[in-house]
Amino acid sequence: MENSEHLTPVQKQLYDWLVQYIDTNKHSPSIREMMKAMNLRSPAPIQSRLERMRSKGYLEWTEGQARTLKILKNKNQGLSITGKVITGGIIEDLSNEPEKIDFNPIFNQYNCFALKVTGNTMISEHIAEGDYLIMRMVSNFQQVKDKEIVMTNIEGYGTTLRRVYLTNNEITLKSFNPDDEPMISLIDQVEIQGVLTSVCRLF
């Protein structure tokens, strides 16, 4: 059992949903319900994620019996710090060996991940070095409001954190560095990975 391994973002999204569903309904969901919750049309991705989470020690179930899925207590509870924000809002990937920090006493961690700020790249937003940015996982710009701060993957730029301005089918992404030019693109040409929900500062 590989319970020292962390979950990938899509695995964590399903895991968090399962935790919430089972806590609310007191029984496990069907594959069809999981597909609907994850906006998937095929059971194959769900089954693959479940198998990987079982191999990592997060889940267990009885083969051949419906609704027997159980959440296993895992020592690695909390939000994964999957990256750190560096100069120009660029995000340095830490997902291979992410740290964990538990904000559960402060807010609901469902469907979220964290980024750690280094330097003063976001000081214009009153966000300082060492702050944690709590990001909600999103998969399209319909889940985002105008002028929110988003995490996007842009070809040629990598993964960055910028403020988004929505106009019909176009988006404008503005950097926190005043020397950087805004980026204008069609919505379907930019991959969005998360939206900022809160900032945590630990003392």
Image (spheres, rainbow, N blue to C red):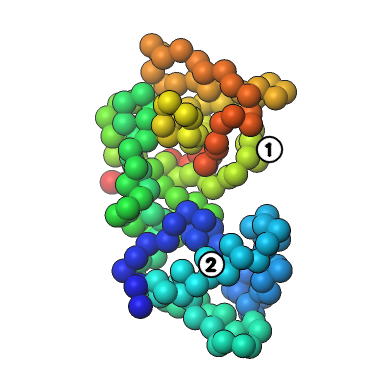
Tell me the tag on residue 121.
none
In which quarter of the view is residue 134 placed? top left
Residue shown at 58%/45% (left/top)? 138
The quadrant of the image that shows the N terminus is bottom left
Could you tell me which secondary element the residue under label 2 belongs to? helix
Which one is nearer the viewer's eye here, 43 or 26? 43
Which residue has dot 2 on it?
A: 48
Residue shown at 40%/71% (left/top)? 56
Amino acid on which disc 1 is placed = Gln
Relative side of 31 to 78, left or right = right
Task: First in sequence, mark 1 or 2: give its number.
Answer: 2
Residue 150 in the image: above or below residue 49: above
Q: Position of residue 132 (x, y in %)?
A: 37, 43
Residue 3 in view in this figure: yes
Q: Position of residue 167 (x, y in %)?
A: 68, 21
In which quarter of the view is residue 101 placed? bottom left
Residue 38 in the image: above or below residue 146: below
Residue 200 in view in this figure: no
Q: Position of residue 137 (x, y in %)?
A: 54, 47
* Label 2 environment density (alpha carbons within 10 Å; few <14, some 14–19, many ≥20): few
Q: CA distance from mark 1 to mark 2?
A: 27 Å
Which residue has dot 1 on it?
A: 142
Residue shown at 72%/23% (left/top)? 168
Which one is nearer the viewer's eye here, 115 or 53? 53
Amino acid on which disc 2 is placed = Ser
Q: Position of residue 62 (x, y in %)?
A: 55, 87
Could you tell me which secondary element the residue under label 1 belongs to? helix
